Amino acid sequence: MSNARIKLPPELDSMPRFQLDDCIVQAHLGITDTWLIRKYIFDRMAQVDLAEEVGWTRSTVSAHISKAIGKISEIAKKLYIKRT
């Protein structure tokens, strides 16, 4: 199992783990996508390893992760990003 290089949007990159986890919960991603995104972000699990775990292709996992990160980012902007 290799460590994934995680590239998060700026609003998520510097966010404390507890806030990021809250955004994941608030995004209502579903059981599988929540598991995927937590393994990907917090455990730094590579997409190919995640794909093997759930029986999907790496490109399907990538699509799910991209969509989830978009939702999480929107939640973060609403809950935690200060507007000036």
Image (cartoon, grey):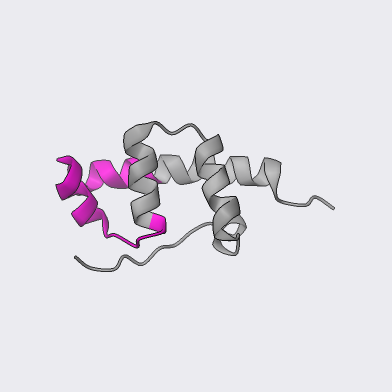
Q: Is residue 68 above or below residue 8?
A: above
Q: Is residue 10 above or below residue 30?
A: below
Q: How many marks?
A: 0
Q: Residue at x 52, y 49 (%)?
A: 21
Q: Residue at x 54, y 58 (%)?
A: 17
Q: Quadrant of the N terminus?
A: bottom left
Question: Where are the magenta residues, as a range?
Answer: 41-65
Residue 40 appears in which quarter of the rendering?
A: bottom left
Q: Residue at x 80, y 50 (%)?
A: 83
Q: Is residue 63 above or below residue 50?
A: above
User: Within the magenta stretch, is there residue 78?
Assistant: no
Q: Nearer the viewer, residue 54 or 69?
A: 54
Taking the image as shown, residue 42 lies to the left or right of residue 50, namely right
Taking the image as shown, residue 46 lies to the left or right of residue 73, namely left
Q: Which residue is farthest front?
A: 18
Magenta span dominant secondary structure? helix
- Residue 57: % across, % down: 17, 44
Residue 23 appears in which quarter of the rendering?
A: top right
User: Within the magenta stretch, is there residue 45?
Assistant: yes
- Residue 52: % across, % down: 15, 49
Q: Which residue is farthest right?
A: 84
Q: Nearer the viewer, residue 68 or 30?
A: 30
Taking the image as shown, residue 49 lies to the left or right of residue 10, namely left
Q: Nearer the viewer, residue 10 or 14?
A: 14
- Residue 67: % across, % down: 42, 40
Q: Residue at x 31, y 36 (%)?
A: 32
